[in-house]
Image (tube, rainbow, N blue to C red):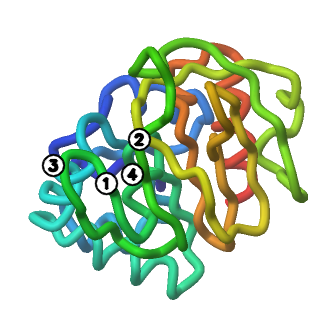
Amino acid sequence: MIAILDYGSGNLRSAQRAFETTGRKVVLTSDPEIAANADALVVPGVGAFGACMDGLLKVNGDQVIKSRIAEGKPTLGICVGMQIMFEQGLELGEFAGVGALSGVVEKLDAPVLPHMGWNSVEISGGSNLFTGVEKESFYFVHSYAVKQAKVSNWATTDYYGKFYAAVEEGPITATQFHPEKSGAAGLKLISNWVESL
């Protein structure tokens, strides 16, 4: 079973429909026990870093994510769901993240924000996530991102400077872009992740 964490942030229905295309059972839940015990957990996120962390803390989502990672259980963050995996976010103040990954979420240095639309990625390391979609573009909408991190496998995107578009570190997979809004390439990426479970 794949659980999509409902903590008041994210495109829950579109994410649910996208993950259901894999043929797996998908549930939306704010129940920490269901989220902790699911075969895989998806942490979506839309909005500001601090607001997302507030919502996550209210459902004990930070503890769920930490316990899953400690136990090696697959967890996927999307957009701000990726950002909150890191140590700190600098959007509208300074906010602590879950701290599962080392890095800081900071404002993009670009003349036009948000960065919105389709962009290609450059893959580094031994990524399995992008198998079959290495040359495809994905849909982004954000003004903040991680520019430096300590991760094993990653992909970057360039929008007036490089930032992390995706990371794969142990049981954590995360994308700054929205695979559920990225057409056939996004569905293939979701399928790749689900097949790795």
Is tag 1's residue or tag 4's residue first in the polypeptide sequence?
A: 4
Q: Amino acid at mark 2?
A: Lys
Element at label 3: helix
Is tag 2's residue or tag 4's residue first in the polypeptide sequence?
A: 4
Q: Are marks 3 and 1 in contact (CB under 8 Å)?
A: no
Q: Residue furthest bottom?
A: 70
Element at label 4: strand
Is tag 3's residue or tag 4's residue first in the polypeptide sequence?
A: 4
Q: Are marks 1 and 2 in contact (CB under 8 Å)?
A: yes
Residue 107's tag is 2
Residue underneath mark 3:
51
Residue 191 as seen in the image, left or right of residue 93? right
Element at label 2: strand
Residue 139 percent location from the top left of the image: 56, 20
Q: Is residue 165 above or below residue 56?
A: above
Q: CA distance from mark 1 to mark 2?
A: 7 Å
Q: Nearer the viewer, mark 3 or mark 4?
A: 3
Is tag 1's residue or tag 2's residue first in the polypeptide sequence?
A: 1
Q: CA distance from mark 1 to mark 4?
A: 20 Å
Q: Residue furthest left?
A: 58
Element at label 1: loop
Residue underneath mark 4:
43
Could you tell me which residue is drawn at 23 percent across and 61 percent down?
A: 94
Crowd rating for badge 3 (residues with CA inside 10 Å; few <14, some 14–19, many 20+): some
Q: Nearer the viewer, residue 174 or 33?
A: 174
Crowd rating for badge 1 (residues with CA inside 10 Å; few <14, some 14–19, many 20+): some
Q: Is residue 20 visible?
A: no
Q: Amino acid at mark 4?
A: Val
Residue underneath mark 1:
90
